[in-house]
Amino acid sequence: MINYMDKFRLNNKVAIVCGGLGLIGKEVSISLAQAGAKVLVLDINIELGEKFQQNCFENNLNITFLKFDVSDFGSYDNYFSDLINKFGSVDTFVNATYPRTKDWGKKLEEVEIKSWQENINIHLNSYCLLTRTIAELMKKNQMGGCIINYGSTYGVVGPDFNVYEGTDMTNQGEYAAIKGGIINFSRYVASYYGKYNIRVNSICPGGVLANQNETFLKNYNKRTPLRRMANVDEIASATLFLASDAASYITGTTFMVDGGWTSI
């Protein structure tokens, strides 16, 4: 008889969470470590990373912080080859990064060409090139593996701008281009590397609760079938599922975790 609960365990596996100090990245790192994985958290802020690592150590979680800058494209091959030489083959790679320029957040007609190009470069291109780098290392090691990229509901459908009424918030045009690109490139890579037992999926969260404007929350909740935003642990739980053997026949999917937002 199959022990189905064992399928959700990640014992003796190595997982990398890129952008592991972000709102979602931290919780994903914790979830994978609680399932038994050795988790390598990659991010740019050394001080925050060391604090997070110490906190995890005190809670008996096998999490190691390592500095990594996704905008340094030329470092990818050597950086991850060295990482694998040190820690062993990578079983799971989660990209939870959200790189953006300092002027991020402007309305579409206000975005300067240079800013558009820079955001496409550091966000979309980093996701695509990191996915290729990790997939090639998994292929070389002949161990298979799992890659999970973060898309968004707004990489699948257009924004409902009504939810921003009464606030100074908006949704960025660059964001739609970036997330739509990430989702379809993930499908491409799932097809390209499937024969090597490498699974590639996109998780598309809806809005995640993080002290947003009350007017926005009211508008958003009214628009969503479950009448609320996601809690960050709900995104982490979906990620843990896709990383586990419980999802061993799932690849190329766009996994919506959006409270039903895209169903209507």
Image (cartoon, rainbow, N blue to C red):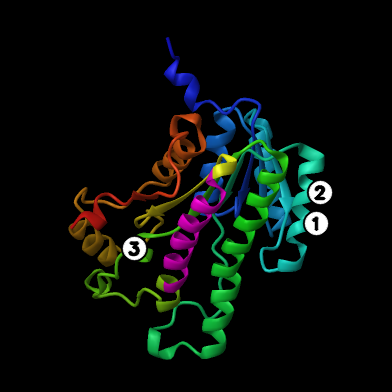
Q: Is residue 81 left or right of residue 120?
A: right
How dense is the environment of label 2, judged by Cα within 10 Å: few (below 14), some, or many (20 and up)? few
For the question of whether residue 101 can be seen, the reply is no
Q: Is residue 19 left or right of residue 211?
A: right
Considering depth in this image, is 222 or 114 the residue closer to the camera? Answer: 114
- Pointer 2 or 3: first along the chain: 2
Q: Is residue 202 left or right of residue 61?
A: left
Residue most extreme to the top: 1
Label 1, secondary structure: give it.
Answer: helix
How far, Cα to Cα, is label 1 from label 2? 6 Å
Residue assigned mark 1? 78
Q: Is residue 34 magenta?
A: no
How dense is the environment of label 3, judged by Cα within 10 Å: few (below 14), some, or many (20 and up)? some
At 42% across and 41% down in the image, what residue appears? 238
Q: Could you say which disc has been placed on residue 82 in the image?
A: 2
Counting from the top left corner in percent of width and height, residue 155 is at 38, 65
Residue assigned mark 3? 156
Q: Look at the numbered discs 1 and 2 and tell me whether their residues touch, using CB distance below 8 Å.
A: yes
Counting from the top left corner in percent of width and height, residue 7 is at 48, 24
Q: Residue 84's image quarter?
A: top right
**Three-letter amino acid code at disc 3?**
Val
**Three-letter amino acid code at disc 2?**
Asp
How far, Cα to Cα, is label 2 from label 3? 36 Å
Q: Residue 173's image quarter?
A: bottom left
Residue most extreme to the front: 195
Count up the numbered dots. Answer: 3
Label 3, secondary structure: give it.
Answer: loop
Magenta segment, which residues?
A: 177-194
